[in-house]
Amino acid sequence: MNVTAPSEAILEVEAAASPAATFDIDSLFRARFDRVARVVARVVRDPARAEELAVEAFVRLWRTPQAHTPQAEAWLYRTAVRLGLDELRRQTRRERYEGLLALVRRNPTPEQLHATTEEQTRVRAVLTSLPARQAELLLLRSQDLSYRELAAALHIHPASLGTFLARAQNSFRKEYTKRYGHQ
Amino acid sequence: MDTNNRALPQPAAFESDSWIDQRIAVLAPSEAWQPNVASGQSLLRKQVNAARSRGPRHWSWVTVFAAVAAAVIVAFALTAAPTPRVLAQRCVDCSIAIWQSISPAAPAQQNLTPTDKRVPAPDFTLTDAEGKSIRLSDAKGKVVLVNFWATWCGGCQVEIPWFRDLYATYKSAGLDAIGISMDDDGWTSVRPYLKEKPIPYTIVIGNESTAKLFKVSAMPVTILIDRQGEIAVTHTGLVTKSTYESEIQSLLK
């Protein structure tokens, strides 16, 4: 995994009270929006919704002066993944309730059918059932975040990250096998 | 030394778990999909400008005060406000007071069945609050007032104070009284009621079969049984205190 240097050129971060005055959100957005939106699109099925949630992650970063550190990018990815997982849980819940009320059940659009494979549905279902931090770690790990950035983003001591990841992988495997058998 | 900047060894578990990697990889969006940076940026600007115009978000003293006041009111409402049962009881008490104030002092009437046409009262055994068995036949030789009532029955609440007085007055002359509560939850309702409004005569919890014995279809129902154990009169619904008093006096003679 690549260890990328914090984007100091992009983040004009100063410890100041007003986020708007000192934090160059526009530059960061132009440089990282594509990547953040792709992170969210991994979790959320609808690409347009993924873009909205990616914007929301940037807005939250801008509003949170405590996150304006060299690790801001990791914070941003974690927030994006968390927003995506929350959205996915909401969708799952809504579908479950709509399933109970056959009258208001909405059929998936052709775009949704095309965009979602069975395997994606399974993986998303397993991720929503895992503890939030474990799902976040598994998703963030698939990004090119450094080991150090990952640990910082999840507030885990770097020395514990390996154990934490092994636990997350184990939970994923167990849950997947429980639901769908050995694939 | 800043341990965070040190090149950290990758633990074995971190290296790869290809099976899981493959699973997670299926979630990757199509390479053909390009997030729309321009519309995203426009949305971001809109939200940032909206946040700027709102100013920094912080709790004002007014908000804190309003929240604390609301919490105090809710806490008070939950702890000090009367329960639905108490409220219902107050409504019943209020209607009783109104009924008593507007009802005319009706002349005493006697509805006693002639002695030769009376039928023996069916016997029953029920238990009182202490678990003691109460049999109707044990009171033979006395005039017995049997009252079917319930804590939720408004008319019963009107009558019970009358029976309390009549029992106190005529107990020594040979009057006995048994109140049969028809509350579905039995002592759960009756015990708190008796604690609040003690009744000097015997109270037992009734059941369907007892109600059938006396053909109780509505409440209150009050039966007067003479000294021979025969039903002298059955009153369904409210009658006046003077009617009861007159009938009891006749039966005690």
Image: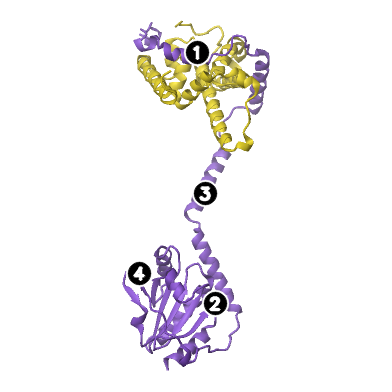
Chain colours: A yellow, B purple
Of discs 4 and 2, which sits in the foreground? 2
Quadrant of the image for the N terminus of chain B?
top left
What mark, if any, has residue B237 been given in the picture? 2
Distance of label 3 from label 4 (alpha carbons): 37 Å
> Under tag 1, what secondary structure?
helix
- For residue B37, above or below residue B70: above
- The residue identified by callout 3 is B74
Decide: few, some or many residues near mark 3? Use Cα within 10 Å; few <14, some 14-19, many ≥20: few
Classify mark 4: helix, strand or loop.
loop
The dot on residue B25 is 1
Q: Position of residue B134 (x, y in %)?
A: 34, 75
| Image vertical order of residue A116 relative to residue B81, above or below | above
Answer whether labels 3 and 1 touch (C-beta < 8 Å): no
* B4 on left or right of A36: left
Tell me the chain of label 3.
Answer: B
What residue is at 32 percent from the left and 69 percent from the top? Answer: B131
Q: Is residue A120 left or right of residue B144?
A: right
Q: Position of residue A158 (x, y in %)?
A: 38, 14
Q: Are marks 3 and 2 on the same chain?
A: yes
Residue A29 drawn at (x, y percent): 60, 13
Q: Mark 1 and mark 4: span between their CA atoms?
A: 72 Å
Give the labeled residue for mark 4.
B129
Disc 2 element: loop
Q: Given contact means CB atoms under 8 Å apart, are the residues at marks 1 and 4 in contact?
A: no
Q: Residue at x 52, y 28 (%)?
A: A89
C-alpha distance separating marks 3 and 1: 51 Å
Q: Name the amino acid, label 3.
A: Val
Which of marks 2 and 4 precedes in the sequence?
Answer: 4
Does residue A69 appear in this view?
no
